[in-house]
Image: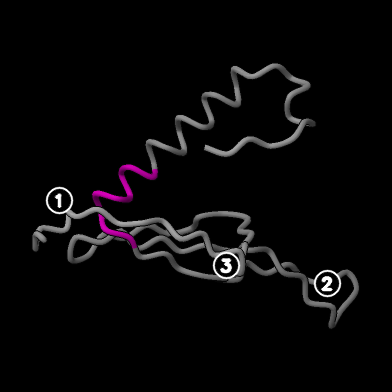
Amino acid sequence: MTNNPSQRTYGFIDNSHAPDVYADAATGFFVFAGNMRITFESLRVSHVASPGPVNRVVIGRLVIPLEQAEGMAKGILDMIEKQKQAPADSSQSTPTLQ
């Protein structure tokens, strides 16, 4: 077995209990010590008044190694390009996994 993480092989375990998180925006990006830190926000309405004021609330932060963040960014852009090229009615069909 090697001590080099890039040469190890790992199995993938799908956790069906992992939470899904919805964010309205990725607000902040910061690189420190080789890790990308991304702050996510969601709009929340305070119902203390009518109409209630809308606030931008931090809902989570993702910290990911810079090299992996680059791969994620490329994967997201690739998926967006594929969605733009897909026929218009395919957005209403069963989603596909990659």
Q: Which residues are magenta?
A: 64-72
Residue, disc 2? 52
Residue in front for this viewpoint, 86 or 24: 86
Q: Secondary structure at mark 2?
A: loop
Q: What separation in Å lies between label 1 and label 2 (alpha carbons)?
A: 54 Å
Q: Main secondary structure of the magenta part?
A: helix
Q: Earlier in the sequence, mark 3 or mark 2?
A: 3
Q: Where residue 22 sits in the image (x, y, percent)?
A: 64, 59
- Left or right of 98 on screen, residue 38: left
**Which numbered mark, 1 or 3, is in the foreground of this view?**
1
Q: Which mark is residue 18?
A: 3
Reply above or below: 67 against 41.
above
Residue ID at (42%, 64%): 62
* Dot 1 amino acid type: Gln
Q: Which is closer to the viewer, label 3 or label 2?
A: 3
In three-dimensional space, the C-alpha distance between marks 1 and 3, rounded to whole angstroms, equals: 27 Å
Name the residue that disc number 1 marks: 7
For the residue marked with disc 2, what is the amino acid?
Gly
Secondary structure type for disc 3: loop
Image quadrant where residue 57 sits: bottom right
Q: Residue 70 in the image: x percent, y percent?
A: 30, 44
Quadrant that contains the N terminus: bottom left
Residue 29 at x, y percent in the picture = 37, 57
Q: Nearer the viewer, residue 24 or 6?
A: 6
User: What label sits on residue 50 in the rendered view?
Assistant: none
Of mark 1 and mark 3, the one earlier in the sequence is 1
Residue 69 part of the magenta-drawn span:
yes
Image depth: mark 1 or mark 2 in front? 1
The residue depicted at 90 percent of the width and 73 percent of the height is 50
